[in-house]
Image: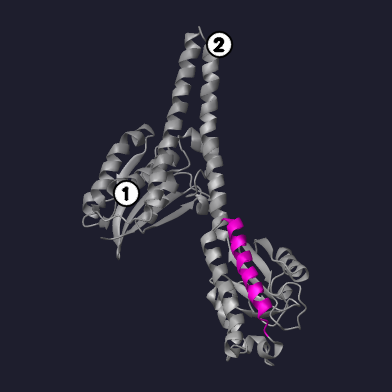
Amino acid sequence: MAALRAFVPPLAIAVAIVLAGVAGHFAGPLWGWGVAGLAAAGALASFWLATHPVSRAAAVPDQHPARSRGGDAWPWLALLSGIPDPALMLDSRGVVLGANPAAASFFPNGIGRHISLANRSPELLSAVEQALARGSAQSFQVRSVVPVERTLVGQATPLFGQQKLEPTEPALLLVIRDHTAEHQIAEMRADFVANASHELRTPLASLKGFVETLQGAAKDDPVARDKFLAIMALQATRMSRLIDDLLSLSRIEMREHVPPTDRVALAPVIADVVAALRPLAEKANIVVEVVQGATLLGEGVIVLGDRDELAQVAQNLIQNAIKYGRLGGRIEVAISRRADRAQLSVKDDGIGIAPEHLPRLTERFYRVVPKDSRERGGTGLGLAIVKHIVNRHHGVLDITSKPGEGSVFTVRLPLA
C-alpha cells in the first residue's frame, strides 16, 4: 500500500502531462481548445497531488535539481518528457526545477535559475506570478521578433492551489506551444482574401462606372460608347484572367501533396509552348530562341510529372519574359541535364529586378511595380503558380537578376 501511495503522485503528473499533450496536439490553432486542454490537465494534476502530497524528503534531494534524474527522488523529471510541447516544472519562487527536451530551444540553460532569467517576456512572467499568487491556472500568449519571429501560447498551472510550499518543491507546471506556423497561415489567408477582393473590386468598379456613363451622358454618343466598351472589354478580360489564375492555384494547392507519376519529355512541351507564345512575342518585336534547338538539347530529358502543369510553368515564365523584357529584345529558353536533374531556364534581357524584391516574387499578388504589372496584364499570381507546381514535382525554382541586365528563371526537376 505504501508503494501504491508513493506511485500515485507521479502517476497524476503523468496523466496531466499526457492530457496536456493530447489537448495541445489536437487543438491546433484553436486557442480556446488548447487552453481548455491545458487547464484540464493542470486541474487533474492539482487534484491528485493535493490529495496525495509528495513529502519534501522524498521529492527534494540535496543535489542540484538538474542533476537529480536518477532513482525515485525526481520521477517527474522523466515524466515531463511525455509531453511533446515544451514543458517546465517551477518551484514556488519561480525557479526552474526541470524541463523536457522540447524546452531546450526556448529556455537554454534555464535549469536552477529563475524563469525571468531564462525568458523575459512580460506576458509569461505575469502568468507565472498570478498563477502562484492566486492558485489558479493562467493562460498567456507571447509574440517575439528577435532573433526570429515567433508566436507562443501556454498555460501556467499551479499543482497545489494556494497551499504554502517549501522552496525547491514542485509548485507549477508550465506548458508552451509554438503557434508560429498557425499564426503565419492565418495571416496569409487574411492577406490573400484582402488582396483577391481588392484585385476583383478594381475592375468591377471600373465596369460599374462605365455602365452608368453609357446609361446616362454617353447614351447617344457613339464615339464615347465605342471607347468605353473597349475599356470594359479589357477590364472584363482582366477579371477573367484573375479568376482563371485563382482557380488554377486552388487546384494545384489541393494536389500539391500528391507527386505526379507520368513520364514527360520536356522538349516537346517547351516546343509547343514557344510556338503558342510566338505571336505574342512578335507583337512586342521580341525573339524567342530555344538554345541549340529543343529536340537536340532536350533529347532524353524526361521527368516524372504532369504535362499540363509543366506546360503552365513554361508558359508563365516565358510570358513574364515577354511582358517585362526589352522591346526588340531576345529571350533564351534552354533545356539541359545537370547530374540527376533536368533544368529549364528562361533568360531575358529586360530591365531586371532589384535584389530586395527577389525573395518575395513568388508570393501571391506581389508585384515589383503594381501599376506597371496591371497595365501589362499581370495578375500577380503567375510565379506563385510556378512555385506550387515546382514544389509538387519536388523541384527547385531559382531566380537571378541584375537591374538593367535582365533576369534568369531556372527550374530544376528530378529526372525520371
- The region drawn magenta spans 30-54
When the figure is inspected, residue 35 is found, relative to residue 174, above or below; the finding is above
When the figure is inspected, residue 136 is found, relative to residue 306, above or below; the finding is below
Left or right of 164, for residue 324: left
Looking at the picture, tell me which residue is in the foreground, 384 or 39: 39
Left or right of 373, for residue 129: right
What type is the residue that disc 1 sits on?
A: Leu
Image quadrant holding the C terminus, namely bottom left
User: Which residue is labeled 1 in the image?
Assistant: 310
Looking at the picture, tell me which residue is in the foreground, 226 or 298: 226
- Can residue 349 be seen here? The reply is no
The outermost residue toward the front is 1
x and y percentages locating residue 367 in the rendered image: 52, 43
x and y percentages locating residue 126 in the rendered image: 75, 66
x and y percentages locating residue 90 in the rendered image: 69, 77
User: Which residue is labeled 2 in the image?
Assistant: 216
Q: Residue at 78%, 70% (x, y): give it.
A: 133
